Image: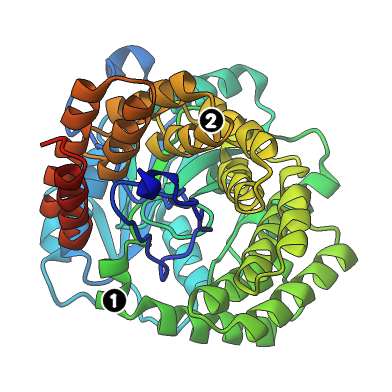
């Protein structure tokens, strides 16, 4: 039974590390990469006729060779938008034909390495009262359509809302999976995008607010409105997105050297690519610029979060903990804070501060009750606190959310053995073995098989 007592080593949102296991010891905290892809319903939209606002919504997009993703994107906005404005910057695949199938208004634009210029050209073609901006690798969550239309309907009477922030999930992102994005706003002659890369309307909106303080900015925190698939590893490899992004970010900062938001994005990219020192320097520069120019809480959150990642990679755990705590203190939606709570829990667990870890994981499960890895990590903390019955319940909840979660089945089997339920334990461990084989983890599966035989359980 010695293998059952192996110490767990949680990891921090890092795609390069892999868990290791011996026997059927508990699998360590996964780092909660949020890699599982949400199910996007292609039918079953709300009764859009009953919720349709009076004001018209224009979808504005810029695209190039997006045939692989475009149909899913455009299908997701059916019943929400009244007009599709698609600006093509040189497609050679079936992008245009797909767009025509959705009655899109198609315009052509010569690309010159400037996203804001192309975005603003799309805005000039729109006729709606409101603008929705999406990329081809994004889709609208059908469960958010009612919330969006209801929010716009409220503004018909109030007439004081300039823009509506939406929550976006970065599917497959290794770092911050949730973000607030300003993608829904009134068609206003003074609202425009700025920035060569990671272009935003924020500066133009803030200028309007300073002159006309009666305007308001609304936020729809629930449900998640946009799923973004551009951070999936295979997509990044196919488009060589990192190199392209880094080049345009650096070009942007040469033009806009005080943009703390872009420093946060570039620093995060450098850290993800393994250049920790350059990433650290870039993020600290971002902090300085954020302080000088009174950056909003979302930018402070991203800077602190990514600085925590750097310090964790450099094994400076006190520094990482401090930055995670500063990130959590920012006034942003709890869903955006989710990875900070989770990673902070992992660090506390790594330092064997299990009560503190448990507190963070409890927060994670309250914020995201459908996040399987949150319950998995909670189970590990409870096991260390010798609350095995509650650990079993946490692992079972993780499996209920994600039935093919091999590590959760493995840990559940261990916990069931310890509380004297061998039949149920064997069933869980055998299921873990099956899943490990199916998911390409043959070495782990074989170790589990060997240990079960040595203990006389099979």
**C-alpha distance separating marks 2 and 1:** 38 Å
Q: Where is residue 301 in the image (x, y as percent from the top left)?
A: 70, 53
Q: Position of residue 165 (x, y in %)?
A: 58, 40
Q: In this view, does 333 lie to the left or right of 169?
A: right
Q: Is residue 279 above or below residue 28?
A: below
Q: In this view, does 60 lie above or below 160?
A: below
Q: Mark 2 points at which residue?
A: 382
The earlier-in-sequence mark between 2 and 1 is: 1
Could you say which is closer to the camera, residue 31 or residue 258? 31
Question: Image quadrant of residue 111?
Answer: bottom left
Q: Which residue is at 21% across, 57% downward?
A: 69
Q: Mark 1 points at which residue?
A: 237
The answer to whether mark 2 and mark 1 are in CB contact below 8 A is no
Q: Is residue 200 visible?
A: yes
Q: Residues within 10 Å of mark 2 (few under 14, many from 20)?
A: many
Q: Position of residue 94 (x, y in %)?
A: 11, 66
Question: SS at mark 1?
Answer: helix
Q: Where is residue 195 in the image (x, y as percent from the top left)?
A: 60, 71
Could you say which is closer to the camera, residue 5 or residue 399? 5
- Colouring used for the render: rainbow
Q: Is residue 12 left or right of residue 161?
A: left
Q: Residues within 10 Å of mark 1 (few under 14, many from 20)?
A: few
Q: In this view, does 382 lie to the left or right of 440?
A: right
Q: Which residue is at 75% across, 57% downward?
A: 323
């Amino acid at each position: 039974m010695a293998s059952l007592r192996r110490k767990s080593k949680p990891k921090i949102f890092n795609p390069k590390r892999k868990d290791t296991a011996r026997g059927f010891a508990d699998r360590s905290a996964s780092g909660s990469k949020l890699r599982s892809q949400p199910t996007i319903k292609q039918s079953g939209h709300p009764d859009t006729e009953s919720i349709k606002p009076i004001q018209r919504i224009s979808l504005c997009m810029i695209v190039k060779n997006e045939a692989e993703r475009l149909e899913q994107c455009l299908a997701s906005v059916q019943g929400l938008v009244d007009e599709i404005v698609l600006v093509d910057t040189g497609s050679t695949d079936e992008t245009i034909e797909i767009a025509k199938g959705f009655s899109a208004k198609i315009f052509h634009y010569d690309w010159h390495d400037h996203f804001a210029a192309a975005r603003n050209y799309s805005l000039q073609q729109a006729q709606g009262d409101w603008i929705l901006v999406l990329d081809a690798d994004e889709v609208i969550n059908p469960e958010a359509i009612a919330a969006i239309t209801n929010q716009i309907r409220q503004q018909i009477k109030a007439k004081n809302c300039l823009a509506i922030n939406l929550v976006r999930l970065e599917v497959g992102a290794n770092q911050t999976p949730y973000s607030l994005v300003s993608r829904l706003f009134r068609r206003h002659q003074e609202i425009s995008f700025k920035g060569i890369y990671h272009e935003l309307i924020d500066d133009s909106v803030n200028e309007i607010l300073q002159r006309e303080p009666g305007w308001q900015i609304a936020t729809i925190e629930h449900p998640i409105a946009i799923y973004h698939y551009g951070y999936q590893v295979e997509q990044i490899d196919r488009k060589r997105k990192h190199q392209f992004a880094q080049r345009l970010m650096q070009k942007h900062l040469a033009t806009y050297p005080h943009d703390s938001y872009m420093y946060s994005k570039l620093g995060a990219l450098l850290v993800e690519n393994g250049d920790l020192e350059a990433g650290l320097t870039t993020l600290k520069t971002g902090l300085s610029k954020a302080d000088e120019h009174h950056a909003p809480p979302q930018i402070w959150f991203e800077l602190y979060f990514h600085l925590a990642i750097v310090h964790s990679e450099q094994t400076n755990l006190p520094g990482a903990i401090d930055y995670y705590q500063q990130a959590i203190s920012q006034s942003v939606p709890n869903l955006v804070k989710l990875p900070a709570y989770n990673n902070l829990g992992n660090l506390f667990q790594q330092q064997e501060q299990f009560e503190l870890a448990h507190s963070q994981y409890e927060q994670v499960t309250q914020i995201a009750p459908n996040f399987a890895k949150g319950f998995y990590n909670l189970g590990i903390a409870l096991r260390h606190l010798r609350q095995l019955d509650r650990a079993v319940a946490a692992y079972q909840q993780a499996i209920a959310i994600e039935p093919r979660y091999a590590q959760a089945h493995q840990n559940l089997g261990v916990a069931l053995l310890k509380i004297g339920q061998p039949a149920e334990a064997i069933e869980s461990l055998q299921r873990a073995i099956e899943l490990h084989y199916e998911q390409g983890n043959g070495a782990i599966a074989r170790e589990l098989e060997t240990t079960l035989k040595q203990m006389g359980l099979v």
